[in-house]
Image (spheres, rainbow, N blue to C red):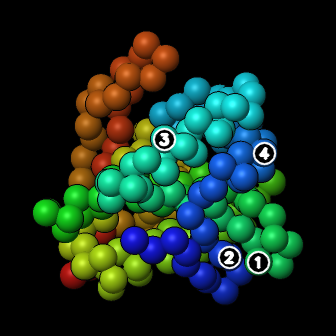
Amino acid sequence: MITELHTERLHLRKMKVSDSSSLFKIWSDPDVTKFMNVSCLTNENQAKEMITLLDDLSQDRKAIRFSIIKIETKEIIGSCGYNSLDFENAKAEIGYDIAKSFWGRGYASEAIYSLLDYAFSSLKMNRIEAKVEPENVNSIKLLQKLNFTFEGTLRQYERVDGKFNDLKIYSKLISD
């Protein structure tokens, strides 16, 4: 399984426990985690636990998460990856988060484009999907910009903090 991808401005490297300090700063920002299916982190050990869990999933080829590193400054500005990999059905689900100070600069679309390219060309996926909370307007705009197709609303699809949330599902096919 791939451990790194490169774009013009970004280096996507498989997440490591040593990234926990940088990722904790991002994942402890309520504006960043508002639409993630995790609660806002309150200590760095939670980031270490999450990275370890994600690493276990990647060992089983079920998922892989990358730290997004800005090449120019070598700083971690977010994370992205394949939340689930389904090789039997040639599909994957992507997810992403960017530190608030880097919003609106095209880093998320650059990282996601890299994920799409790798999934279609190397992993031989046919379908990439993203599930987004209806209020996450910025993420929806990003998916639309990348020509994802809105397929519908998954009603009360996941429970977060005891509340059932709807999710909008978007997809992109290799033939799109």
Q: Which mark is residue 93?
A: none
Q: Which mark is residue 71?
A: 1
The kind of secondary structure element at disc 4 is helix
Q: Quick check: can you spot residue 37?
A: yes
- Of mark 3 and mark 1, the one earlier in the sequence is 3
Q: Nearer the viewer, residue 22 or 26?
A: 22
Q: Are marks 2 and 1 in contact (CB under 8 Å)?
A: yes
- Of mark 2 and mark 1, the one earlier in the sequence is 2
Disc 3 versus disc 4: distance between alpha carbons?
16 Å
The residue that mark 3 highlights is 53
Residue 110, x across and y down, in percent = 58, 75
Q: Which mark is residue 21?
A: 4
Disc 3 versus disc 1: distance between alpha carbons?
26 Å
Q: Is residue 9 left or right of residue 1?
A: right
Q: Nearer the viewer, residue 170 or 158?
A: 158
**Mark 4 is on which residue type?**
Ser
The residue that mark 2 highlights is 10
Q: Quadrant of residue 129?
A: bottom left
Residue 173, x across and y down, in percent = 25, 72
- Of mark 2 and mark 4, the one earlier in the sequence is 2
Residue at 73% from the left image edge and 59% from the top image edge: 77
Q: Which residue is the extreme one toward the right?
A: 73
Q: Is residue 35 left or right of residue 41?
A: left
**Mark 3 is on which residue type?**
Leu
Location of residue 103 with respect to 154 vertically, above or below: below
> How many residues crowd mark 2 within 10 Å: few (<14), some (14–19), many (20+)?
many
Location of residue 61 with respect to 100 vertically, above or below: below
> How many residues crowd mark 1 within 10 Å: few (<14), some (14–19), many (20+)?
some
Q: Are marks 1 and 4 in contact (CB under 8 Å)?
A: no
Q: Is residue 47 left or right of residue 123?
A: right
